[in-house]
Image: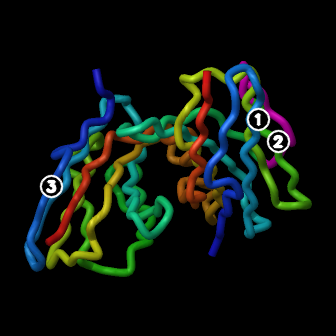
């Protein structure tokens, strides 16, 4: 059974629209993260959450907003989508808040037309 | 900010041979260095890591070496098998003010192909 679930697996959106990427982890981990992997750049850290609190935000744009309704959920809302947002977005989690041994979800591949 | 360079974009070895993937980093304060494997169409899978208080760590056929002076670390895979074929990513992380190493900076990946 998958321990980190990301929905949807594929997502196509039009420029200017808004989408929410879902992430749930069933590993009992206390920290969760978002990363982005695009064709042009290596895998990039975006956010860190610990016990549902934002610990770090490395995205330059406020269009990216993480949302944590439960300790094991960390969704990512993206507004005013642009073609440059096209990428695979990975959710990850780690047992402790130190960030060691991060486990990655299967990813959501977002294409913005 | 930290930059991680992965020197080999592709690497091809014969089954049973050893493979070595090399990475360098720029931030002398980096203290945590994990490696991930990504098989075709799948997500990243943690394989091994090393912290800066040691210079070598082994787990079965995998060994990670860390040279802090040269800011270089490497993944050695012995007795390679076709199932080892994948993209391998190295990463580095410096601790924040609270001592956490959650912000991983990744290399671009090395595609390892093991031919039977």
> Do tags 2 and 1 sit on the same chain?
yes
User: Which badge, 2 or 1, is on the more N-terminal residue?
Assistant: 2
Tell me where residue B96 appears, x and y as whole percent: 62, 63
In this view, the mark in front (2 or 1): 1
Distance, label 1 to label 3, CA atoms, is 37 Å
**Tag 2 and tag 1, C-beta contact below 8 Å:** yes
* B67 vs B85, nearest the viewer: B85
Query: Mark 1 = which residue?
Result: B76
Q: Nearer the viewer, residue B106 or B20?
A: B20
Q: Nearer the viewer, residue B103 or B97?
A: B103
Marked residue chain, label 1: B
Residue B110 coordinates in the image, percent (x, y) = 60, 49
- Crowd band around label 2 with a 10 angstrom C-alpha radius: few (<14), some (14–19), many (20+): some
Quickly name the residue at label 3.
A11
Q: Which residues are magenta?
A: B52-62
Q: Sort mark 3 into few (<14), some (14-19) or many (20+) by Cα contacts within 10 Å.
A: some
Mark 2 lies on residue: B65
Query: Do the residues at pointers 1 and 3 share their chain?
Result: no
Quadrant of the frame with the N terminus of chain B: bottom right
- Give how far across and how far down residue B33 sits, in percent: 68, 48
Alpha carbon separation for disc pair 3 and 2: 40 Å
Please name the residue shown 27% across and 67% down the image. Answer: A86
């Amino acid at each position: 059974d998958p321990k980190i679930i990301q929905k949807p697996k594929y997502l196509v959106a039009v420029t200017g629209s808004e989408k929410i990427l879902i992430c749930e982890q069933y590993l009992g981990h206390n920290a969760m993260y978002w990363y982005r992997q695009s064709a042009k750049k290596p895998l990039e850290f975006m956010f860190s959450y610990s016990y549902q609190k934002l610990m770090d935000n490395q995205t330059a744009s406020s269009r990216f907003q993480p949302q944590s309704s439960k300790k094991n959920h960390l969704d990512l809302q993206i507004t005013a989508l642009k073609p440059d947002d096209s990428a695979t977005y990975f959710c990850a989690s780690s047992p402790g808040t130190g960030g060691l041994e991060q486990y990655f979800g299967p990813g959501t591949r977002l294409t913005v037309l | 900010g930290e930059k991680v360079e992965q020197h080999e974009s592709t690497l091809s070895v014969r089954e049973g041979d050893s493979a070595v993937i090399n990475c360098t980093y720029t931030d002398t304060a980096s203290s945590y260095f994990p490696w991930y494997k990504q098989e075709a169409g799948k997500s990243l899978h943690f394989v091994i890591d090393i912290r800066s208080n040691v210079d070598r760590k082994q787990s079965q056929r995998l060994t990670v070496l860390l040279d802090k002076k040269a800011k270089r670390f490497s993944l050695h895979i012995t007795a390679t098998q076709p199932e080892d074929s994948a993209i391998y990513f190295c990463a580095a992380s410096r601790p924040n003010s609270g001592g956490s190493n959650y912000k991983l900076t990744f290399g671009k990946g090395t595609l390892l192909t093991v031919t039977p």
